[in-house]
Amino acid sequence: MPRALRIKFTQNRIVLDFGWQAALKAMLCLGLILAAVFIPLPGIEAAAPRIAFVLFVGAASLWITELIPPFATAIMVIVLSVYLLGDVGNGSGEHQWEKYLNPVASPVLVLFFGGFFLAMAATKHGFDVRLARAFITPFGKRPTMLLLGIILTTAMFSMFMSNTATTAMMIAIIGPVFHEISDRPRTRKMLVLAVPFAANIGGMGTIIGTPPNAVAASILYQIDGGKYAISFIEWMMIGVPIVIVLLLILWAVLILVFKPRREPLAVSFPDVVEVTPALLFVVIVFVVTIVMWLSQPLHGIPSAVVAMLPIGLFPVFGILDRDDLKRIDWDIMILVAGGMTLGVAMKETGLSTILVEAIPYETLPTIALLSVIAVVSIALSNFMSHTSASNMLIPIVTSIATISPRAGALVVALSCSIAMSLPISTPPNAIAFATREVTTRDIARYGTLVSALGLAVLLGAIVLFVQ
């Protein structure tokens, strides 16, 4: 039976390939969308937030059920946002619709694009083999230890550079391993899932690890003359222990879930790989890009701008050609853009604020309030940019009188990082999804499990360390 709706145009007929599973999914999605349209909800009486709410429910149901391809849902979100919310008929010269197209060329997607270029060049010219030898070989060939090596290496890099770039680089590093374990699909899936999850977790460790951390630090610095400001070291004292605990939990969860066989993996790397001028050029650009990402606090050049270095140099010098560009997963780029456009729609129409302010903060005890804030942060961050979610939530929670501003800001920032239940939740998830080794269900199932365990660890740490 087909699992998704397929529409075929045959001669003069339209044929619907519609199995019972697709029928159930269609009925579920249609029911949710109709409920979002007609059920009265406080604060969503106006047209704009109601449209955004319907888009949110419709996109979420289609992404989860995969009734249509995920990228098709993303395109639908972009198009409907422009036509329904963009005021396209406005003759005043104010192009409101442009804000819904801006994510298509956002810095996040530029960074994403640059990560693709680095990974493709490293694979094409053999640099990924050398990286694999350097980072993976020391952990041996046992699946559990190889998994630990991948988790720790990914988290270490993601503390100081973009999670997106880290994931793209690590996927390129473990690429050669896949060629040697084609007969162990569950192990392949385990290793792929480890990379984005470890990258998301590792970014929690430092202020520069992920944008929500920087948002929290900057807002805390402005409150009461810097009374609640948090330094780089203070953040690490809270963040790094949480990261270590979560990485160990991630390691244990993946081993328990996938139960890799004890036999060592038949992983081998060439002892000698020919050194070519192209390889040297790739290494130089790769290293310069990574160093500039790591040293961003010193030179101040945004990560997305740094990512343009390989984008500009590799095609010019023939490192990547037209055929290489055809192999880029453009559908994944569209998927990320659609998720960001949905976040813009929620923010611009006020829907996000309506959903957040519906919570009765004053009646909840401190730990319950922090739990609610964390759950809301995770829920929103699964469907919109983590940066947008933190920008929206942190000013609200730091103004709540019943909790410490530092506790509220940290809960939001760190909760955003553990939101990883969908391919569109984070760019690292999307990169892993682009390998075709994992499905939306895999990411939803195991990402939600890791998020739930991370929530428990996070709340415990906040209660212990934050006053």
Image (cartoon, helix red, strand yellow):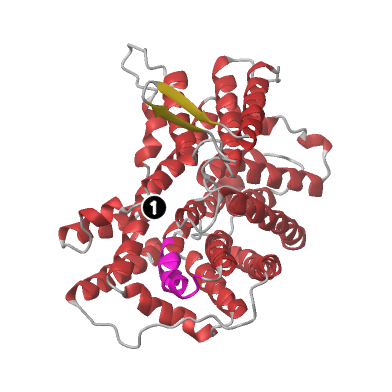
Q: Is residue 229 magenta?
A: no
**Residue depicted at x 56% and y 41%:** 389
In the image, taking residue 248 as reference, residue 167 lies left or right, namely left
Q: Residue furthest left?
A: 317
**Residue depicted at x 46% and y 74%:** 177
In the image, taking residue 368 as reference, residue 258 lies left or right, namely left
Residues shaded magenta: 168-182
The quarter of the rendered structure image containing the N terminus is top right
| Image quarter of residue 273 | bottom left
> Which kind of residue does numbered mark 1 sit on?
Phe
Give how far across and how far down residue 87 sits, in percent: 41, 17
Mark 1, other Cα within 10 Å: few <14 / some 14–19 / many ≥20: many
In the image, taking residue 35 as reference, residue 198 lies left or right, namely left
Q: Is any atom of residue 441 visible in this view?
A: yes
Give how far across and how far down residue 47 sits, in percent: 56, 15
Q: Is residue 181 magenta?
A: yes
Q: Which residue lies furthest to the bottom in this view?
A: 271
For this rendering, which residue is in front, 310 or 244? 310
Mark 1 highlights which residue?
Answer: 112
The quarter of the rendered structure image containing the C terminus is bottom right
For this rendering, which residue is in front, 267 or 227? 267
For this rendering, which residue is in front, 305 or 84? 84
For this rendering, which residue is in front, 145 or 312? 145
